[in-house]
Image (spheres, helix red, strand yellow):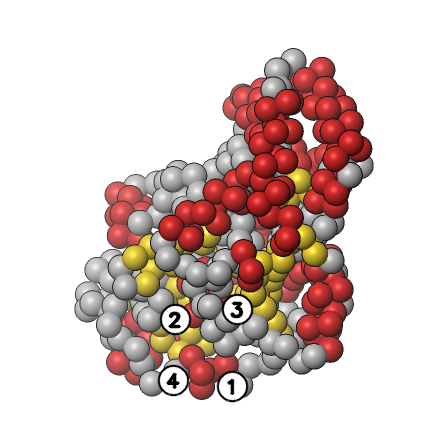
């Protein structure tokens, strides 16, 4: 059986892990498995709307904003300038993880001075805007991510470094809150907001850092760096199924802008893909199963959001979606997760082509009209009934499971280098 150390010995020094579908593919598990072999794990985009769940000896750990590496005592976590941070929520996340027994968390975290601050009123704004959209709602998590990035783009946001000048910070946050109150007719308790932020600042201020400079020095020293993606390619603000997307660039390019590292700093990219497809919230989902089989997969895969608890929509593996992410991001290999969830499904389908009228298309359409007309070509493969959760070598998988993985490789245009066959961090097959 190929061990993680054997697998990583052939990998480049600086490695990125990205989602290839619509998020929730299981990035956290692979990041945790790899983290012990890297000195730095870096988060470049997004906020606490992401949730990475790791299971160790039946004990569950959930990471929201922090990189999924802190179970390993010698690994540092970097939260980059491209993220949006609610300091109060971050303090809570740290405290909850400390309560599980994880040691020296704060001494191993660096927070970019240029990361934007997300406040409680951003959550109010998020909920109000979503409510006003009525039937055209996006399905946001209402964690304030979009409004915070909106303030950033409108050049009225506040960054971590602004906390260092308390008088200026107070003036700017009051002006910002009043702007949103006036525009949306909401009431914000700004004094309560300022008080809670300042309490959180005192607890976290030793973590504030010029992370771009820190990473630049780390690369010069030859330290091993792992770049952790948030959400997934098809939720990218520019290249996803707009407008049903997140508010940042979560594809490979976002690593560079969100951490201040040059493109050549990313030497290898592993894409994460579920053995089927899921999506949370609204938006197009060509292979969705709105039937008993979809419910069965959701139940067997425990498909509920780690952050929101919302049930995920489930469907067949979509090779068009994954191939698009592979080509766009230059992905070198795939980690196929949750193969065990498909045990017992008699026949498995893989979407291979999209057609609109007489024209083949290579992306998920973003308009409802086009999605209503979309024709999907499927391949059908036989399933398997054997329990594979204890399998650790590809050759020991049922033949039909092997054929399914091999066909995914062929249709996605990318080799499958590792396979998840259970929730535990050890439930991985490396090839």
Dot label at residue 2: 4
Labelled pair 1, 3 in contact (Cβ < 8 Å): no
- The residue drawn where x is 20% and y is 67% is 387
Q: Nearer the viewer, mark 2 or mark 4?
A: 4
Q: Nearer the viewer, residue 411 or 41?
A: 41
What separation in Å lies between label 1 and label 4 (alpha carbons)? 11 Å
Residue 261 visible? The answer is: no
Q: Which residue is mark 1?
A: 9
The image shows residue 144 at horizontal and vertical percentages of 59, 34
Q: Which mark is residue 419?
A: 2
Q: Does the image show residue 173?
A: yes
The crowding category of the residue bearing disc 4, from other C-alpha atoms within 10 Å (few below 14, some 14 to 19, many at least 20), is some
Marks 2/4: CA–CA distance: 12 Å
> What element does badge 4 sit on?
loop
Label 3: how many Cα within 10 Å (few below 14, some 14–19, many 20+): some
Work out how far the residue at label 2 is from the one at label 3, CA to CA, in angstroms.
24 Å
Q: Earlier in the sequence, mark 1 or mark 4?
A: 4
Upstream in sequence: badge 4 or badge 3: 4
Q: Which residue carries the number 3 mark?
A: 75
The spot of residue 266 in percent (x, y) is 67, 71
Mark 1 or 4: in front is 1
> Quick check: marks 2 and 3 in contact, CB under 8 Å?
no
Instruction: Give the CA separation, mark 4 to mark 3.
Output: 23 Å
On screen, residue 75 above or below 122? below
**N-terminal-most mark, 2 or 3:** 3
């Amino acid at each position: 059986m190929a061990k993680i150390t054997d697998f990583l010995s052939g990998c480049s020094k600086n490695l990125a892990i990205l989602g290839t579908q619509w998020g929730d593919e299981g990035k956290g598990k692979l990041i945790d498995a790899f983290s012990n072999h890297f000195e730095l794990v870096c988060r470049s985009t997004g906020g606490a709307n992401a949730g990475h769940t790791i299971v160790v000896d039946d004990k569950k750990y959930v990471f929201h904003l922090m990189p999924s590496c802190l179970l390993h005592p010698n690994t540092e976590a970097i939260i980059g300038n491209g993220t949006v941070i609610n300091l109060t929520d971050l303090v809570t996340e740290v405290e909850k993880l400390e309560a599980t027994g994880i040691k020296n968390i704060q001494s191993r975290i660096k927070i970019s001075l240029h990361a934007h601050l997300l406040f409680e009123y951003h959550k109010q704004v998020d909920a109000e805007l979503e409510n006003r959209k009525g039937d055209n709602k996006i399905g946001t998590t209402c964690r304030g991510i979009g409004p915070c990035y909106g303030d950033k783009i409108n050049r009225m946001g506040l960054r971590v470094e602004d906390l260092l000048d308390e008088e200026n910070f107070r003036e700017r946050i009051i002006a910002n809150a009043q702007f949103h109150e006036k525009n949306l007719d909401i009431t914000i308790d700004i004094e309560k907001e300022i008080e809670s932020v300042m309490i959180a600042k005192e607890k976290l201020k030793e973590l504030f850092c010029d992370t771009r400079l820190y990473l630049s020095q780390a690369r010069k020293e030859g330290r091993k760096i792992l770049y952790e993606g948030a959400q997934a390619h098809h939720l990218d603000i520019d290249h996803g199924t707009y407008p049903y997307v997140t508010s940042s660039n979560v594809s490979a390019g976002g690593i560079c802008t969100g951490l201040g590292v040059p493109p050549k700093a990313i030497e290898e990219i592993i894409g994460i893909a579920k053995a089927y497809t899921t999506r949370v919230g609204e938006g197009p989902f060509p292979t969705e199963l709105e039937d008993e089989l979809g419910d069965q997969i959701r139940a067997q895969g425990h498909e509920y959001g780690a952050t929101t608890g919302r049930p995920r929509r489930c469907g067949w593996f979509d090779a068009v979606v994954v191939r698009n992410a592979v080509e766009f991001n230059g992905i070198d290999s795939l980690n196929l997760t949750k193969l065990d969830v498909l045990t017992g499904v008699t026949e498995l389908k893989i979407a291979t082509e999209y057609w609109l009228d007489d024209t083949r298309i290579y992306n998920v359409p973003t308009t409802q009209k086009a999605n209503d007309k979309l024709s999907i070509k499927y391949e059908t493969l036989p399933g398997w009934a054997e329990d594979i959760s204890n399998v650790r070598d590809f050759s020991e998988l049922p033949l039909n499971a092997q054929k399914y993985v091999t066909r995914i490789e062929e249709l996605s245009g990318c080799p499958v280098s590792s396979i998840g066959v259970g929730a535990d961090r050890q439930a991985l097959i490396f090839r």
